[in-house]
Image: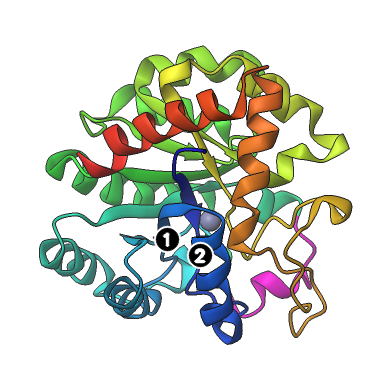
């Protein structure tokens, strides 16, 4: 019998999952999920997530402005965030972060970025810093998204206060060599189920270097679809034809991470449970 499972980062509220929510609830309960951190990316998400948290006992709400949504944030976003956190002492902050991929590598017509003003890295940094400072003051768990901006992120984290409990680098895709520096700064690292894909050897290498007491697991569902042959919860494609990841694939994140760390699955699951409770629930 495995200990209960914990998804450190997903987007259960996302439009792509809404039609499937009751079936997903059944599936994740059957898989043994105890808690999932559901991350808002913009203020419009936040009341939706608060409502889900009232409906599903496994939903742990997290409120933040994502770097993709940073360019479209309303003027009163920060006051709204403060109010959200004040209303729920167990809520986390996130997802926040820095994303150079959106600026340098994303296709101009990427449907996931449709309608979004792509904020510059300095603007993203300013919005991230305000949220990080709030998380630090209140010692809330905070989830950081970073794509192709790990040098900049490390520079920032060295010079600001972070929450005494630490912070989460979700789906860490930075260089394996930077893991110890981030760990020293207080980072937890969540292994995404998609990292089981053949082309993700560098991600797996990075997770070999993560201290055992900083390991977590996540799906980022509906984003980051898992390798097709390993997808035990296929969902219909999104309206724009993209594959949709199911939160039930958290089991694959656990088995993939157990393999990377050459640990029995039960031992890994106990470790992740301890880490999750320490970081998110105490
Ligand atoms: Zn995410």
Under circle 2, the secondary element is: loop
Render colour scheme: rainbow
Tell me the element at label 1: strand
**Label 2 crowd bin: few (<14), some (14–19), many (20+), radius 10 Å:** many
Residue behind mark 1: 39
Question: Is 47 rendered above or below residue 153?
Answer: below
Q: How many numbered dots are placed on residues in this image?
A: 2
Residue 53 falls left or right of residue 145: left
- Residue 66 is tagged as none
Report which quarter residue 262 is drawn in: top right
Instruction: Report whether 134 appears left or right of 86.
Output: right
**Residue 77, located in which quarter of the rendered image?**
bottom left
Q: Is mark 2 within 8 Å of ligand 1?
A: yes
Q: Magenta-highlighted stretch: main secondary structure?
A: loop
Residue on which the image places disc 2: 11
Can the viewer see residue 117? no
Q: Residue at x 19, y 54 (%)?
A: 90
Indicate if the residue with disc 1 has its beta carbon within 8 Å of ligand 1: yes
Locate residue 107, reporting x and y percent. Answer: 80, 63
Tell me, yes or no, if residue 62 can be seen here. Answer: yes
Label located before the other in sequence (1 or 2): 2
Question: From which residue to which does the magenta span run?
Answer: 106-116
């Amino acid at each position: 019998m495995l200990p209960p499972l914990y998804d450190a980062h997903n987007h259960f509220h996302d439009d792509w999952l809404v039609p499937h929510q009751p079936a997903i609830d059944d599936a994740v309960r059957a898989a043994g999920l105890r808690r999932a951190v559901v991350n808002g990316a913009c203020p419009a998400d936040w009341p939706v997530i608060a409502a889900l948290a009232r409906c599903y006992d496994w939903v742990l709400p997290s409120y933040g402005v994502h770097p993709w949504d940073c360019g479209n944030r309303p003027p009163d976003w920060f006051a709204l965030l403060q109010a959200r956190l004040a209303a729920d002492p167990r809520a986390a902050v996130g997802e926040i972060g820095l994303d150079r991929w959106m600026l340098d590598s994303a296709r101009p017509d990427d449907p996931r970025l449709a309608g979004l003003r792509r904020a510059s890295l300095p603007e993203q940094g300013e919005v991230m810093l305000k949220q990080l400072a709030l998380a630090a003051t209140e010692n809330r768990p905070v989830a950081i998204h970073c794509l192709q901006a790990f040098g900049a992120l490390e520079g920032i984290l060295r010079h600001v206060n972070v929450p005494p409990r630490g912070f989460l680098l979700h789906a860490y895709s930075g260089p394996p060599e930077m893991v110890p520096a981030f760990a020293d700064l207080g980072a937890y690292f969540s292994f995404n189920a998609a990292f089981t894909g053949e082309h993700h050897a560098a991600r797996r290498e990075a997770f070999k270097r993560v201290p055992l007491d900083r390991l977590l697991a996540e799906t980022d569902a509906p984003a980051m679809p898992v390798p097709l042959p390993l997808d035990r919860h296929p969902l219909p494609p999104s309206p724009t034809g993209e594959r949709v990841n199911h939160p039930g694939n958290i089991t694959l994140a656990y088995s993939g991470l157990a393999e990377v760390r050459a640990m029995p699955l039960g031992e890994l699951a106990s470790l992740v449970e301890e880490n999750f409770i320490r970081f998110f629930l105490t």
